[in-house]
Amino acid sequence: MSKFPDRILSTALAICLAGPALTAGPGLGRPATPDEITAWDLDVSPDGSGLPAGSGDVMTGETLFSERCAACHGEFAEGIGNWPELAGGLGTLADKDPVKTVGSYWPYLSTTWDYVQRSMPFGAAQTLAPDEVYALVAYILYSNDLVDEDFVLSDETFLDVTMPNANGFIPDDRDSVEVPLFTGEPCMTDCKESVEITMRAMVLDVTPEGSDAREVASDEGAGGAEPFPDTSQPSAEVALHDPELVAAGEKVFRKCASCHQVGEGAKNRTGPHLNAIMGRTAGTVEGFRYSGAMAEAGEGGLVWSEETLAEFLADPRAVVKRTRMSFAGLKSAEDIAAINAYLSTLGE
């Protein structure tokens, strides 16, 4: 007779006898006290549950931000060096290089509040009182043009704020949509009845250039594909600017984006929009309230060109004394050349 049933019975008996010891655990530590649990339970939900009572206004937040946060994130939440910008980037999420900030990317205000409360200031986390957290978050919202300067954030006004990217996230349905597509038996032969070229890559390093390319296009044109345009001669508009310099300037412009907007639909914010700035008389953007100093500079003949703008970007207050623009200026000549090139491409 086999001994296997006896071994099963012996093992089951041993487990039953050892059960109470395993359930009791190793006998280390102690249960957390209610105060300890409260100290760690800081969660704030999108519906505002978990918020402590309190409030803070934009102006108080600006002072706190300057004292506790600006060393890393800049006076205008524009970010310094590799420290992240917290403002700007609206409308860039579909770009090749999107700018993800509190204003452009974060879907819930509770995430901002919870992060500031739990993790900031850097090196002194959880030292801020609730009113200070409310004030800092109010200033971050203001820096993103999401509230006015007299706004007061509190546990009662929290749900009055809707983040621009609140509906920008979608449920992760890859398990039901993508996995079935890539887990079936792959087709290896005669997968389609016919194969046609429907699009062409326009990236220069993968698309044949010159006459050889057009010969190929001509040969393939008989198959029904549309011939691609002749790009061997750049247009006059493109030839004016080095594309790499323009792209570099677009990145440098992030330092300005918390105050200035550009592109389609650009509006005046903390600073005027900068569309078509080249050739424009200083202080003349319609609807923007300039400082008296900037208006006088325009009346005195200051017109923005690559030369005058370069001087201004290097040291704004040396060019226009008493300007309200508190930006310290760009120290790198390369950055100034790049941002000039970028701004030169912007029309109305």
Image (cartoon, rainbow, N blue to C red):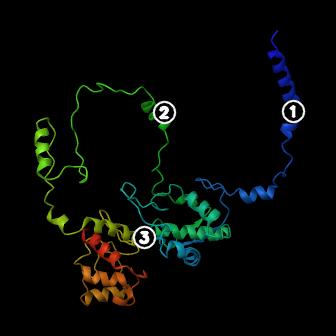
Towards the viewer: 294 or 289: 294
Is residue 307 visible to the viewer in this orientation of the structure?
yes
Categorize mark 1 by other alpha carbons within 10 Å: few (<14), some (14-19), many (20+): few
Which picture quadrant has residue 121? bottom right
Quarter placement of the N terminus: top right
Crowd class of label 3 (few under 14; some 14 to 19; many from 20; radius 10 Å): many
Q: Nearer the viewer, residue 340 or 334?
A: 334
Q: Residue at x 27, y 84 (%)?
A: 308
The residue pinned by badge 1 equals 18
Q: Position of residue 224 (x, y in %)?
A: 14, 36
Q: Amino acid at mark 1?
A: Ala
Say if 183 sits above or below 217 in the image: above
Q: Amino acid at mark 3?
A: Ser
Residue 169 falls left or right of residue 337: right
Q: Position of residue 279 (x, y in %)?
A: 22, 78
Distance from disc 2 to disc 1, alpha carbons, whole Å, reads 43 Å
> Mark 1 or mark 2, which is nearer the start of the sequence?
1
Labels 2, 1: front one: 1
Q: Which residue is mark 3?
A: 258
The CA span between labels 2 and 3 is: 40 Å
Q: In terms of sequence position, does the residue under pointer 3 or pointer 1 come before the other?
A: 1
Instruction: Name above or below for residue 95 compared with residue 249.
Output: above
Residue 348 appearing in the image: no
Q: Nearer the viewer, mark 3 or mark 1?
A: 1
In what element is the residue under mark 1? helix
Q: Quadrant of residue 217?
A: top left
Residue carrying label 2: 176
Identify the residue at the far top of this view. Answer: 1
Where in the figure is residue 262, as x and y percent of width and height? 32, 67
Q: Quadrant of residue 204?
A: bottom left
| Callouts 2 and 3 close, C-beta under 8 Å | no
